[in-house]
Image (cartoon, helix red, strand yellow):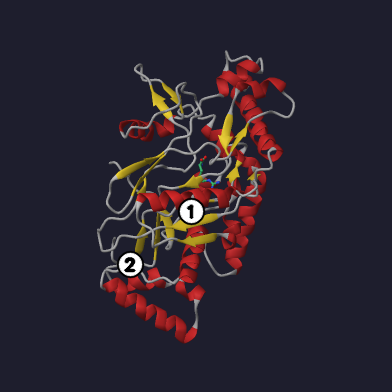
Amino acid sequence: MPVPADRDQVESELAFLGEAHSGPVLAGRRAVYRVALSAGHPAPLTPAELTWAGRIAWRNHARCIGRLYWRTLTVRDHRHLDTADELAASLCEHLALAQGDGGVRSLLTVFAPPDRPGGPAPRIWNHQLGAYAGYRGRDGTILGDPKNAALTAQALVLGWLPPAVRSRFDLLPWIIAGRDGRPQLFPLPPGLVREVPLRHPDLPWFERLGLRWYAVPVISDMRLHAAGTDYPAAPFNGWYMGTEIGARNLADVDRYNLLPMIAEKLGLDRRSPRTLWRDRALVELNLAVLHSYAAEGVKLVDHHTASTEFMKFCEREKSAGRDVSARWDWIVPPLSPATTPVFHAPLHEFPTTPDFHGQPPAWA
Ligand code: ARG
């Protein structure tokens, strides 16, 4: 756990407390934090302060287009949990609460931080709580999601028994290490992760492709950094934007690479890129994603609405006197980018705290 080195850094780490408190209370809390941090202890955040930290981390995160709703984040304070079994039980609750009846609640669960600088902390090995296996065959080809090939290999080494007949959409077990650092396997009970079968509003054959995706993305491998303290296990979720699934996960050449197959079914001429077979297939696939989630009653936002909401977020931040850190290449939707207002907005990124950060794979 990096301990803030100098006074200025400590002050910037603690600046967010000014939104939680004011006057003498604020001064008192800052003093308490300074003592804890300089002694190398985790920040003694109260549960209410942890909620502020989580919400502001979301508000700060440069890659997220959905930040208009940052105030609605529910934060679960599970900093007292540090064994793999405890984390697994808590993650089941997280999923159930987040999925709800399809309404999708934005949720962050914070588990134990390291107990001393550089000390061990629990860690979730999975990138997301619902994710599909990617089985690498002898010839190097992958069945399923190539993004998860490394984790799938780890699960198999740890003794995971995949379904007798492997498919493109087998949910991976969770791999969780408690403070003892020992990875444990938690196969998912059927039905724990809600999924949405994909169909198209006008093309009956689409449903027979057998495509699906899970309802809610719960990111479980990022580290929350707040008040000079790292929380390496702090899974969070919002709801999906359609293009994440339809224009990236299912479409990218190094993911499910489905555009050639869909173009084929659509009867498009793939001999020249100029027929725009990729673009036409992409639109139909994205239409199917939007249609299917709506039909199943699972909340998911389209990229036009999300872009408009992001512009509103920027305006509100400006009137609150805050600058917005944002990465253009992450915010601009991958489908019809220039038809959305964010394409034309000047965006820039700068360091923020609290924030969520990537971290090296737990097994590296
Ligand atoms: N892009 C990732 C995926 O497709 C999810 C990232 C978080 N997305 C979100 N809407 N909160 O699974």
Please tell me whether mark 2 sits on a helix, a strand or a loop. Answer: loop
- Circle 1 residue: 62
Residue reaching furthest to the bottom: 24
When asked about the image quadrant of residue 38, the answer is bottom left
Instruction: Identify the residue shown where x is 45% and y is 81%.
Output: 26
> At which x and y percent is residue 283?
65, 30
At mark 1, the secondary structure is loop
Amino acid type at image mark 1: Ala
The residue lying at 58 percent from left, 44 percent from top is 240
Seen as rendered, the residue at the extreme right is 202
Counting every numbered tag in the picture gives 2
Residue tagged 2: 42
Q: Of residues 12 and 167, which is closer to you in this image?
A: 167
Coordinates of residue 11 in the picture (x, y in percent): 37, 73
Is the shortest distance between ligand 1 and the CB of mark 2 under 8 Å? no
- Which tag is nearer the camera, tag 2 or tag 1? 2
Neighbor class of circle 2 (other Cα within 10 Å; few <14, some 14-19, many 20+) is many
Determine the CA span between mark 2 and mark 1.
25 Å
